[in-house]
Image (tube, helix red, strand yellow):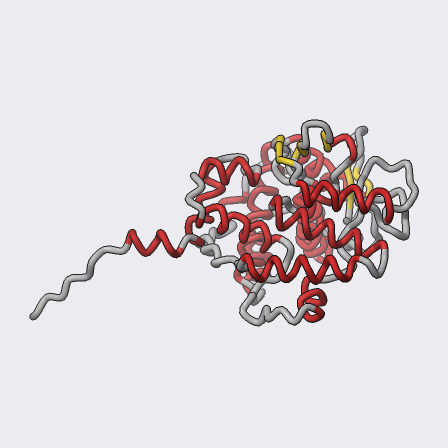
Amino acid sequence: MHLIINSQKQIIRKEERVQRISNYNLNILNNYLIYCKDNQSSDRTLEVIDLYLRNFIVFIEKQNKKITDIDSILIKNYVVELEKQKSLFNKQRDLWLLRTFLRYLNSFNYLDIDYSYLVPTMKRIPKSIPTIWSEDELNQFLNTAKEISTKSDINNRDYVIYLIAIRLGLRLSDIRNLKFDDIDWIKKEINIIQVKTKVSLKLPLLNDVGWALINYIKNSRPVSDSRFIFLNHKNFSSPVKHTNLTIKEICEIGNINISNKRKKGIHSFRFSLATQMLNKQTPLDIISSSLGHSTLNSSNHYLSLDAKNLVKCCMEAFVYEL
């Protein structure tokens, strides 16, 4: 993580690898980040904004200018630099960040002119069909992870993380931030505020998930006063950042063929859960609430996964002789 914003609305950068910029420009960037934070941007989004707007500010400073010196020529030259990037996604992202930043600068009187009109728009990149795991593959994956879990406390922690991701479809950010206060053992419920959407989510505490959690807490979790359940086993006060056992390693140990999986991240388990629910004729609104989407439209992407029912929508092709 590059930065956090504390309760006093100060920007604190946690790593020194970010590009250095002048204090004058840094102060304006900090004000913009606070503005974004106040408008419900997540911490991860703030990191991205900070990282990529610094590229723009470094470009400005190489020409011995400040943010308040921005003019049309500078904007056009920077857009030309962005066009040299090979990744279409990177271009789209950087242009959007630049456009919104320029609007902010004009709205808050850092610039007299809104130069955002000089930043070209690009067609939205269509979402690719995500990686889907079959139920057999998921069961084989969990069985392998469970066998490995007995070898170390860290492996046991990682097994429970994967179990929650597969059974409940939680994002990794929400699993990392899971606290003891989020679990109602009497009602067998998990209640969280999601990191990405800030939307509350209630999920059932399934039996296998509950017992796995109890086993980790009693036998593998480091002794710590931290309220986070899954800890960094080197720094017992900090929540885990990522699993030590990768999906690829577990699949190699379990002889699970994942050559057809284009994206093998933990988020693929979330898509797979949605597919299972679709195959069981679960209504889209139920899937949406189970996955904690902020709007029903967020779930529409999962319709592309339901190949079985999409076939029913095909229209009959007619052949005409000319």
**184 or 37, nearer to the observer:** 184
Q: Position of residue 175 (x, y in %)?
A: 71, 44
- Quarter occupied by residue 210: top right
Q: Residue at x 50, y 40 (%)?
A: 287
**47 or 23, nearer to the observer:** 47
**9 or 1, nearer to the observer:** 1
| Looking at the image, residue 321 lies above or below residue 129 | below
Res 217 seen here: yes
Q: Is 218 displayed left or right of 197 in the figure?
A: right
Q: Residue at x 69, y 44 (%)?
A: 209
**219 or 241, nearer to the observer:** 219
Q: Position of residue 146 (x, y in %)?
A: 73, 57
- Quarter occupied by residue 190: top right
Count of numbered circles in the view = 0
Q: Is 311 displayed left or right of 259 in the figure?
A: left
Res 113 seen here: no
Quarter holding the C terminus is: bottom left
Q: Position of residue 306 (x, y in %)?
A: 42, 52
Q: Position of residue 177 (x, y in %)?
A: 74, 40
- The residue at the far right in this view is 223
